[in-house]
Amino acid sequence: MRIVNLENQKVFKKKLWQFPWDYKESFIIAGGLLITGYLLQITTRTSIKAVSAPVNYIIGGLFIVMLLLLHFTSRTHPWVKWLRSVPASVSAIVLVLIQAIIMGTLPQQNFVEGVKPDLFGFSFVLTSWPFIIAQLYFLTTLGLATLNRMTPWQWKNWGFILNHLGLFIAMTAGILGSGDLQRYTMKLYENQLVWGAENEEGVMVPMPIAFELTSFDMETFTPKLALADITNNSIETKGVNALRMITKGDSYDYKGYKIKIVNYIEDSKFTGNGYFPVNEEGATPAALVEVKSATIDTTAWISCGSFATEYSYLQLNDKQAIVMLQPEAKKYSSHVNVYVKDGKNDKTVIEVNKPYKVGGWKVYQLSYDEKFGKWSKLSVVELVRDPWLPVVYSGIFMMIIGAAYLIFKGRGTVI
């Protein structure tokens, strides 16, 4: 038996910045990158504009070449070994998560109107220096870790490679492709052929596709009754029956009032002393409402009105009134003729959340003239073209397959 004298053995503690680097060094570097990003943001005080083709292709190509050179020429260098290590990957993920948390908790200029830019870029995270640096750090660690598993090739690693390579492709394509994303709005008026669309700055841009609006259709929900404060034009929203969907014959209690809907006409027009059914533009919903309380017992017609008919309400006292709210849109669509340069013409219906695809473009139903509602002669559609989207989807598909394999493989592993 061998006896070891533990008193003579010395325990050596690794000094900071002594290779191989671990979590301490990794998070110090990540923190330094974060501070650098915010210092750049403070000094430049601007958002980074996305680059379009061919500049984004050049940047992407140079980045991939850099990763390949680092892997094949300096694979054993301590820095490269650290960049593809787990500590570096974890610190990079944390850096990205910080930006994601900021973006998810604070209003962003791209999504919320009226948000002003700030000194640190918190209101435009996606185009700020800290976000770009965090993404570059993350993609570098991800790319080198993936290359390390790819060479030499071993079939047992294909799930890991597919998952990580898919993530790399999806994120890289999403960042580089943002500059090639085209988004325009086109205002369509009935029986008018429109070839031009407007960009975000309101500049008219000629398009290879033209649309002619033949008709605009809208389905609405039944309007609601509400109790309004006529002194400040506010609507009471608290309580079970605060906003009551109109149903003929319905009765309910609210705020000490017994309210009954005696009659309801979906399309009507005021004539004489009441509302009568009509089938013409500008027809408005109307309801005959009975209200009883300790101080009032009355019946009257009320209506939300339209561009052709004035609204009417039932005043209860000097402060309160029963009003009808404008009906909310349930579904609206545009019937259009489509004309494509050097292509085949078509007829289609563009609906909300059901884009029409033509010539590499997706056409979405966006809005209409709210003043005229279902009688609108204007339909606004949005045209979107993203040539990088198939690449992003390919990366996501690779991620899913790789993740499914890793999960399936993990189930068969006995610990």
Image (cartoon, rainbow, N blue to C red):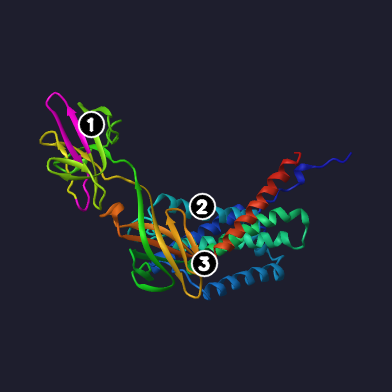
| CA distance for labels 1 and 3 | 53 Å
Name the residue carrying label 2: 97
- Answer with left or right where residue 89 lies relative to residue 278: right
- Residue type at mark 2 is Leu
Q: In the rendering, at what x and y percent does residue 236 appear? A: 23, 37
Residue 287, x across and y down, in percent = 22, 37
Q: CA distance from mark 1 to mark 2?
A: 57 Å
- Where does label 1 land, which residue? 262
Residues rendered magenta in the picture: 287-308
- Could you tell me which residue is drawn at 39 percent across and 60 percent down? 120
Question: What amino acid type should be assigned to the residue bearing mark 1?
Answer: Val
Q: Nearer the viewer, mark 3 or mark 2?
A: 3
Give the residue at x 25% y 53%. 281
In the picture provided, is 72 more to the left or to the right than 192? right
Label 3: element kind: loop
| Quadrant in which residue 380 is drawn | bottom left
- Residue 28 can be seen, yes or no: yes
List the residue tagged with mark 3: 360
